[in-house]
Image (cartoon, grey):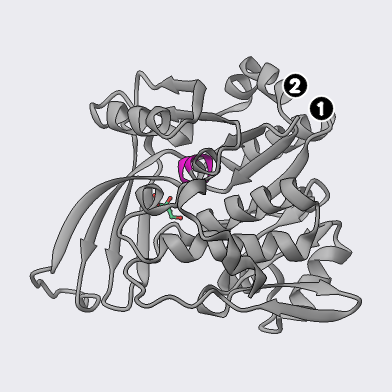
Amino acid sequence: MNKVLVLGSINIDFVSFVSRYPNPGETFIGKDFDIFQGGKGANQAIALAKLDIPTFMLGKVGKDSYSDFALSSLVKNGVNTKGISKSQKNITGYASIWVNSQGQNSIVVHPGANGEINEDFILQHEKLFVETSWFLIQFEIPHKSILFALNLAKKHGLKTLIDPAPVGQFNLESIFKFADYLFPNEIELKELTQTDDILSGINMLKSKGVEEVIVKLGKGGAGYEDKGKLILFPAVPVDQVVDTTGAGDCFVAGFLYGMMQENDIVQAIKTGNLVASYSIQRKGAAISFPRKSEINWKEMAR
Ligand code: RIB
C-alpha cells in the first residue's frame, strides 16, 4: 500500500519578481507579480499527486475566498482532500515572497488557518493514518500538533519523512526519534546542530535517533552519510533558474517517489534532484512541479 498522508500548511503565495531585494525604507517597482498555490504541505502533496502517488492531505484553509482557490488546486492536481476543513475564524495561510533575478526566494509566512491544526483535529482524522503507509510533515503548523501527529503515525506503523522547515524556536530533541527521513537544507542543518560542517551535523542528528538525514543543498544538489563519508549528488543542470520557490518540497516528493520505486536511498536522492530540476525552470511553487509523464527519466542514468 503506497499511499501517502501529508499533514501541513496550505498557503496562498503572493509573489513579487524583483531585480534585487529592497533595502529597509526603500520602495521600488517590481518586474512581475503573481498569486500561486503554496504552503509546504500542499506543495508536497501536489508534487506527489503529480507523480501519480495516491496522496491524502490533512490541513486547514480559511474562511476567505482564497480557500476555494487552494482547495480546487489541490483537487485539480489529484490530491484527496477529505482531510481538509475550512476554518470559521481565520483566513487562509499566506506567504509574501520575493524572487530575485537569480531565482532565489525570501519568504514570510502568515499561518492563518494552519495555526488551528490541533490534537483534536488530527484525532478526528485518525482513519487516514490507517489507510496510508507513509507520513510526510513540515514545520508550518503548531509544534505540539507535529509531535502528536508523529506519535500517531508511529503508532500506526507509518514510515515518516520530516521536512524541518522553518526550524523556529522548537525543541526538536523530542521529534528526532520519530524521524525515518529528515530533510534539512544547509541553513536548517546549522540551526539544528550549531555546526557548519555537513557531515558532523548529519552524524549529530543520527546519534539523536534520526534514521537517515538527507541534506538539501540547492545548486549543490543533495547529500547523505554512508559508512562515515558524506556522499553528494549534484543538482541536475538546467539552462535557466527562474524561481526556486518550492524546489525543496518538490525534491522531498521526488525522493519519496524514488523510495517507493526501488527502496534505495541513492536512487531516491537522484530522483529528488531530477524532479526538482523541472520546478526551478518555471514560476511558482506547486504549479511549477512536473507531471510524471513530462519527466525525461533517462536523465536518471547520467
Ligand atoms: O517551500 C515553499 C513554500 O514555503 C511556499 O509555497 C510558501 O507558501 C511557504 O510555505
Q: Which residue is label 2 attached to?
A: 130
Residue 178 on image: x %, y %: 80, 46
Q: What span is in magenta?
A: 42-46
Query: Residue, x 36% and y 60% (percent of image)?
Result: 107
3D distance between C-alphas at marks 1 and 2 = 6 Å
**Would you say residue 300 is visible in this rendering?**
yes
Identified by mark 1, the residue type is His
**Would you say residue 166 is visible in this rendering?**
no
Identified by mark 2, the residue type is Val
Residue 85 on image: x %, y %: 45, 20
Q: Which residue is label 1 attached to?
A: 156
Q: Check residue 45 for magenta coloring.
A: yes
Query: Residue, x 23% and y 26% (percent of image)?
Result: 65
Query: Residue, x 20% and y 52% (percent of image)?
Result: 34
Determine the secondary structure under disc 2.
Answer: helix
Q: How many C-alpha atoms fall within 10 Å of the one at disc 2: few (<14), some, or many (≥20)?
A: some
Q: Are marks 1 and 2 in contact (CB under 8 Å)?
A: yes
